[in-house]
């Protein structure tokens, strides 16, 4: 089970996530978010981790691709997660410049498809408003159609308390959490990070 802890803003929290077994850590570059971090801040955390082997992900929403790539290069991340409905051309530009890509869609956007593409991008299904703790329930899949046949990552409303049931019911290949492991908006709770990762894999 792939686990990504998103909304990282400091080195200590990044180290806690790694020590707990996270496969990836995400950095939100979106000024309207309480989890926003700039390229220099991301670079400092990545440099502080050294050769950890963890996947580092720049999370962006509705930014021009030129700006996204500038921040990605300056920050030193290995992956870009697009949340703004960007087309294949923008995703391919990121791939061409050496980044892995995650395409994040709401369940409604995914169901409205088709999303067949030659672009090598992983799929993440999120709530309509990312970062607001909204849960994607089994009934939503029943309304919009079957689960994806391709590998996919579940996000939206996951918490320490519900991740085990969500994984068991929806059977994603990975999970992504941000607000569900916070003590306040934008402030990560280290104990919750550890418990979330353990529960996701139990």
Image: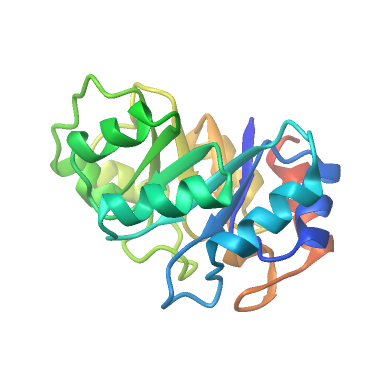
Give the quadrant of residue 184. bottom right
Position of residue 36 in the picture relative to residue 95 (left or right):
right
| Image position, residue 79 (x, y; %) | 50, 38
Q: Nearer the viewer, residue 74 or 148?
A: 74
At 44% across and 28% down in the image, what residue appears? 98
Q: How many numbered callouts?
A: 0
The answer to whether any part of residue 9 appears in the image is yes
The answer to whether any part of residue 155 appears in the image is no
**Where 178 sits versus 103, above or below?**
below
Q: Nearer the viewer, residue 142 or 125?
A: 125
At 54% across and 36% down in the image, what residue appears? 78
Position of residue 50 in the picture relative to residue 117 (left or right):
right
At 79% across and 46% down in the image, what residue appears? 49
Quadrant of the drawing holding the N terminus = top right
Give the quadrant of residue 164. top right
How is the structure coloured here?
rainbow
Quadrant of the drawing holding the C terminus = top right
Q: Nearer the viewer, residue 111 or 70?
A: 70
| Image position, residue 59 (x, y; %) | 46, 54
At 48% across and 38% down in the image, what residue appears? 153
| Image position, residue 15 (x, y; %) | 82, 51
| Image position, residue 100 (x, y; %) | 45, 31
**Where 9 sits versus 158, above or below?**
below
Position of residue 110 in the picture relative to residue 7 (left or right):
left
């Amino acid at each position: 089970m792939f686990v990504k802890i998103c909304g990282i803003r400091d080195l200590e929290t990044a180290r806690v996530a790694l020590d707990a077994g996270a496969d990836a850590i995400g950095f939100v570059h979106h000024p309207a978010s309480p989890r926003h971090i700039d390229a220099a801040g991301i670079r400092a955390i990545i440099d502080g981790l050294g050769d950890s082997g963890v996947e580092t992900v720049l999370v962006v929403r509705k930014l021009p691709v030129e700006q996204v790539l500038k921040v990605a290069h300056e920050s030193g991340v290995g992956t870009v997660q697009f949340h703004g409905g960007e087309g294949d051309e923008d995703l391919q530009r990121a791939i061409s410049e050496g980044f892995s890509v995650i395409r994040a869609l709401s369940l409604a956007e995914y169901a409205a498809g088709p999303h067949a593409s030659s672009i090598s991008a992983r799929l993440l299904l999120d709530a309509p408003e990312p970062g607001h703790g909204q849960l994607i329930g089994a009934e939503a899949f029943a309304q919009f159609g079957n689960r994806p046949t391709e590998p996919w990552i579940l996000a939206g409303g996951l918490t320490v308390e519900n991740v085990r049931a969500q994984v068991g019911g929806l059977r994603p290949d990975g999970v992504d959490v941000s607000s569900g492991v916070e003590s306040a908006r934008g402030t990560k709770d280290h104990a919750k990070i550890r418990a979330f990762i353990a529960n996701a894999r139990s």
